Each structure stands twice: as C-alpha cells, then as structure tokens.
Image (tube, rainbow, N blue to C red):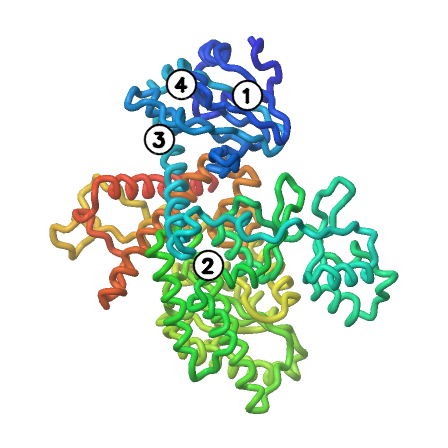
Amino acid sequence: MLQTIKDRELYERIHNNPLFVSTTEEEFDELLMACKLKFYEKVEKSNYFKTPQEGLLLVLQGSAEVLIEGQDGSSVMLEMIQEDEIIGFSNFAYYLGEMARPLDKHHIDMEVAENSICLQVPYEVIKSRMDDQKVRDFVLRKMSLRLSNVYTSLGEQVRLADEYGESEPYVRRVQDFMSSPVITIHAEATTKEIAELMISRSVSSIIITDKAGKLLGIVTEKDLVDRVIAGGGSPTLLLAKDIMTKKPHTVKVTDYYYEALTKFYKHGIKHLPVVKAGKPVGIVTFATLITKRDRNSMNILKTIEESSFENLPVVKAAIYDVLSNLIQDEISTIHTLEIITKFYDRLAKHCVMLAVQSLEAKGHVTPVRFAWYQMGSGARGEQFMLTDQDHFLVYEDVPATQAREVEEYFKLLGNEIVIHLEQAGYTRCLGFMMASESQWRGSMTEWKERLHQWAMESTPEQILLGYNFLSFRFLYGESTVNDRFVDMVNNQLQKSATFIYYMAQQERDKPIPHLQQNFLTIFRGRSKADIIDIKKHALFPLHHCLQILGVGNGIINATPLEIISALQKKKKITKDFADEVRHAYEISLSIRISMSWEKHLRNEKISTEIDLRKLRRWELNELRTTLDTVRALQAHLLSKL
C-alpha cells in the first residue's frame, strides 16, 4: 500500500523514523495516508507556519532555514533544519492546549537552502503517536536539544548586546561585519591580473569562482608571495587555479561571531569566505574580528607569541580571564572548549619552540626531524584549566652509529619541554607520562616495538598506557613525521586484536552505576552521602568505548567528537544514537567544568565527585540520562566483541 509514498526506499526511511518506527506496516500505512509529501525548490519561501493544524514537517532530503521577518522587511534566521530533523516544535504548547499560538503575532517563513522533500505530519497523527512512550521520549529529547540551542543563542545575543552597546541590540552574526560585495575572479585569470585587482581594490584576498558563481578557492597575498614570487613562477603564466587554496574553510552569513572566531583559531587562517547556497557573498578577516572584540581579551594571542621563559606564567592568567568570561556568558561547553583549546595549543607549541631555542642557544642543534604529541585531556580538547603534563616525542630513525647522539639530544629536549611547560603552569605528571622519560620518547622503530610489546603483554598497566596513548594529538614538529607515525600506529593496532579485546573486556568489568541503587555498596569509605564521580563513571568510560570503537574502525588520532562523527559517517552507529552520545558527552563535560571552576574560585581542591543530594531534580534527571547513554555505548561496544 504505497499510494502516498511510491518510492520504497523513502517509505522505509519514513517508517524507520522514531515517530513511526514502532508501528506495524498496516498501522504505518494508515497514518501515512493522512500525511502529505511536500516538494520544495532551492531558495523557495513558504509560509508553512500559517496554521498550527499543519502539524510537523519532517525533512527527508535537503535542508531549510526558519526565518522571522522584521517590520523593515529584513529577516533573521531562527534555526537551520537538516535531513531527518523536524520543523514545527513551537506549536506543541498549542497542541497540548496550554496556550494560544504565539507565532500568530509574527511573520515566520521557511526558506529552502537546497531542493528538499518533506513529509507533513498533521496534528491528528501527532496526537495519536504521542500515546507511545518512545515517541514522547524522542520528541522530548529533540525539543530539549532545540531549546538548549535557543538558550545558547540568547545568551550570546545578550552578551554581545552588552559588548557592542545599546545601539546594536541584536545578536552579531557574520552578515553584520563581513565585507560585501565580495571581489571575485575566474579560475583562468593570471596571477598578474589577481595582483593588479588586489592593488586596485585595496584587498588582501580574491575569491575564485566558476561560471555559475560557485566558490572554487581563494588567493591571498601570502599565496602570491609563497607560490609565485618565492616559488619563482611567472605572474603571466601561472593561473588562479594553479595557486589558489582549493575548497577553503567557509562560514555562513548566519553563523555567530564566536563561531567564526573559533574557525580562525582552529585552522590557523586569516580569511574566511562567507557563503550562501554555495556562492560567496562576502569575506571576513581575522583582523576584522579582532577589532570587534575587547582588546584586553584578544591580546592573549600576542601575549603567548611574545612570551619568554620568564613571563610564561602571565599567559595562564590571561587564558583564565577569557575562560571566566566564556563561562559567565554561558557559551555552550563545546564552543568554550574549542576556543580555549586553541589558546592552550598555542601555549604548548610556544613552550616546545622555546625549549628547542633554549637548546640551540647552548649549542645543541636538532639532529633529525621530530614530532611532539599531547595526550590526555589536552589531546582530547577537554582541557579548560591547566592540568598535569601528558606528552611524548617521536623522531626519525637514524643509523646505529648516530643513535646514541640523537637519543641524547631528545633526552635534553624532553627535559627542556617539561621545564617550560611547568613554567607556564602545567604540573609534572605523577605517572611520569612525559617526554622527559625514556619510555615516552623514541625513534619510529622504537615506538613500533613499544606498541608491539604493549599488545603482547596486555597487562592492566599496559592497557592503561594504551588508553592514555590512544588520545594522542600532533601539536609541534614535522607533519611528514606525524603522517608516518599515524600510519605505523594504525597498522600496529590492526594487528593487535587481542590487545583491543582485553581493553574492551576491562570496560565490561567496570559497569556504569545506576542512580537508583544503593551507593553504600559501591563506594566504600563514604558515609551516608550518595556520591558519583563524573570523570570516573561517565567521561572515562565514554572515552574508552569511543577509543576502542574508533580503533576497530581505523579511526585514531581524533577527539571524542571526531570519533562520534566518523562512526556515524561509517554507519557504525545511528544518527540518533550519535546525537545522544554527543549530548551525554557535553553534559558530562559541562558538569565537570562548572564544578571545577567553582572550586577554583573558592580556592578549594579540584574534585569531580558529585553529592547527589545537592542536585535539583532536573539535574539528577540529566545525570541519569547521561549515565544511561554511556551504559548503552558500553553495551554497544561489548556487543561487537
């Protein structure tokens, strides 16, 4: 019975949606007859929100923007809806009879970003499906996530309104400060033409587009210097397509200020094309964003780059000042960590650079190319406050006659790095997992043998080392060394199935606690207080499960969020489960950050233990949901053994 949906694949996709998945085929067909397929073309506008009886709109293919129109005819985007997401949650209060429909007072439009197919699910169908507990849970979860995003946006709006003054009370988006119209040129233009255009228009970059106006690449002044002048190329023979940066990082007109700023820090770039529907409509430069910010906060970058060994401690205070502002402004945990991690990365790399320079001043020149890696929370992008050191060194293989000399140099370098990081505020690792220790530095061959030894022994101690090691992230040195190292590690891990199996078995022996059970039987030494450790019982199991699943699917050298996305892309976990794991991860981090920061402000010892009696009901429910999700991830891992 496919009178409404004739495409079997589309039919199955709708049936597998959480709104309908628990229905029989006969029940589903009956419900489907009441729904309608909607086809929208790109850039088409639709006043979908005309009446609440229209129900929900499930996006099956494509994407759409929900806009609110002002009295002056301008529009502000409320949200961006992707495939498998739902439009119309704002009507639920009306459906439940709790209030009149608030959207009647505003002009709300839906603008299609790309050709889309949607399923209109009327109110009668929604009402019948809400009797299913799983459907109610699904709707509640989706509405909670949407509400969380709205609060983040509102928090940023209030903060930026304060920062920019009452004359600019609206949230600052990229479209508010981008340079427009964008200056473009075709891919066959010569570099001489590009240089002349830059001079005549007083710009430092040119966007390259195809005949349809789609973004192909970008050419900056640095590209001209590096790839034409320094490279010895001919300005009249080299074309734009020869020297441009292809598929550059971009931002959307509706992205927030801090999202654009994060991209600059994350990718180390100075120009970001602004795109809409794949076409460039403006450009944002790092210099522009910096001038829009409070200079006292943003000068931290200059502070880091210009710091010497003696004034490294100043940097920590500057970063903590930015962190304090982000926490007070209630910027989302993930965005906060993205911004702060980039500061810490710069600080750590600067310390290594100073360590190398310190040895050079003493007559010790780097003998071979090397790579320096972080481990632990810093490598996972979770370090919001300076913690202990976790890092290692890898260097190129050399003939046996040079091995002793090279090892001596990297022994000195490992010690110098530890000293410089300590000066910056990183305490020494109590477990001695630092490049100053012989087992945490070595040549490519030595590391290969070390990994093989860990896999062969598979003791609890070796497994612990493996967990810490698997979170590694390249921060300083030669990228070619890093590429070879990552390939070597991946090959070794694929040969170490037994080691990975024991790692997973260890997770089975560490069950996630249920909040309902008696904690006195779990935490010996506690009195009557119900205590749970968010790090031990949520974050660590989540990290370990993701690491093991990642290794099993060839995903290493990645942060937890990157592993989740990669597993979803490889279809090893569903989109809904990936969203749940991301949510659990963010909640765990949020709890850890807020607890630790409050203790830091009170000069108390940092702890990740939570007294459940002090939690409000909604906080307890969030924690319970988080632990349930981590437990489900653990079960998913064990099911793969």
- Report which residue position mark 2 lands on: 339
* Label 4: which secondary element: helix
- Residue 12's tag is 1
Name the amino acid, label 3. Leu
Closer to the eye: label 4 or 1: 4
User: In the rendered image, which quarter contains the N terminus?
Assistant: top right
* Residue 42 percent across, percent down from the top left: 63, 30
Picture layout, residue 34 above or below residue 350? above
* Residue 528 percent across, percent down from the top left: 12, 50
* Residue 469 percent across, percent down from the top left: 48, 62
Labels 4 and 2: the sequence-earlier one: 4
Picture layout, residue 200 above or below residue 437? above
Q: Residues within 10 Å of mark 1 (few under 14, many from 20)?
A: few
Closer to the eye: label 2 or 1: 2
State how far apart marks 2 and 1 are (Cα): 41 Å
- Report which residue position mark 3 lands on: 140
**Contact check, label 2 and label 3, Cβ < 8 Å:** no
State how far apart marks 4 and 2 are (Cα): 40 Å
- Report which residue position mark 4 lands on: 126
Q: Residues within 10 Å of mark 4 (few under 14, many from 20)?
A: some
Q: Residues within 10 Å of mark 2 (few under 14, many from 20)?
A: many
Labels 1 and 3: the sequence-earlier one: 1
Q: In front here: 139 or 314?
A: 314
Q: Is residue 333 visible?
A: no
- Left or right of residue 353: residue 297: left
**Contact check, label 3 and label 4, Cβ < 8 Å:** no
Residue pushed farthest bottom? 362
